[in-house]
Image: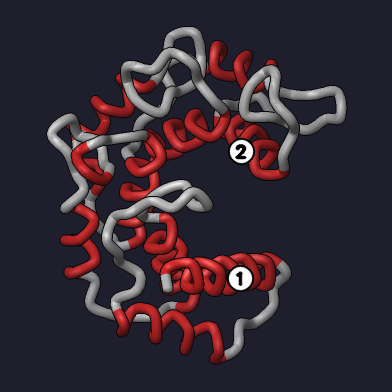
Amino acid sequence: MLELDLDSTYSYYYIAKALSMCGERLDYRFKEYVFSVINSGRHVGTGDVYAEVSSEFDLTFMILELADLLNVKYDTSETEKWIFKFKNADGGFGARRHSNINSTYYALASLYLLKCNVKRLHDTKIFLRECEKPYGGFTVIPNSVTPYMEHTYYGLTALNLLGESCRFPSQTVDFILRCQNANGGFARSDSGISTFENTFQAISMLRKLGFL
């Protein structure tokens, strides 16, 4: 069931985003789908993470952003409570008391869409700062040493949601540029293969950091 939900939600999410960017009006089927998912409670799950998703909050985030885009009104209290169940003692978010930067970003982004005051989460800011490296980039957990593109994107964007900025902007720009390949695309590391996702993340961060 979760796999079917993810497939459907990915389709609705990216089609809705693309149509909105093109100035197209979204028809009633999008609202019907969002209402059906929210009313069934399928936008919150068990906290298990499958190989094809970035975080246990992936589906939740997409449904919440769709609801925001479509101006769907509903009781958000239970969703907020469910997300906070995954907040750990170190300030990060993650299943089974193991925080990581992916889950922390998606949790914050979801809470932000729920109009929660995420800027009050000072311990979460500390967790993110511990993932931020003085030589540039962010790591998936504080004790890791190797930054990757997606973790840097999650870390930088999560800090922005908290009203914070990167402490090592020039080093982070250098890390991002080292991940660019001869074909113009960006990879998750300086020895990786270019992907559309990593290229989007790189361009977004370079703009936020004032390089572009």
Question: Is the C terminus in the top left, top right, bottom left or bottom right quadrant?
Answer: top right
Q: Secondary structure at mark 2?
A: helix
- Mark on residue 138? none
The residue tagged 1 is: 11
Q: Identity of the amino acid at label 1? A: Ser
- Mark on residue 201? 2
Instruction: Tell me if 81 is positioned left or right of 109 in this view.
Output: left
Q: Is residue 120 visible?
A: no
State the colouring used for the structure image: secondary structure
Q: Identity of the amino acid at label 2? A: Gln
Looking at the image, residue 103 lies above or below residue 193: below
Residue 110, horizontal then vertical, whole percent: 35, 56
Q: How many marks?
A: 2
- The residue most toward the right is 183
Looking at the image, residue 79 lies above or below residue 70: above
The residue depicted at 65 percent of the width and 24 percent of the height is 211
The residue depicted at 47 percent of the width and 47 percent of the height is 54
In front: label 1 or label 2: 1
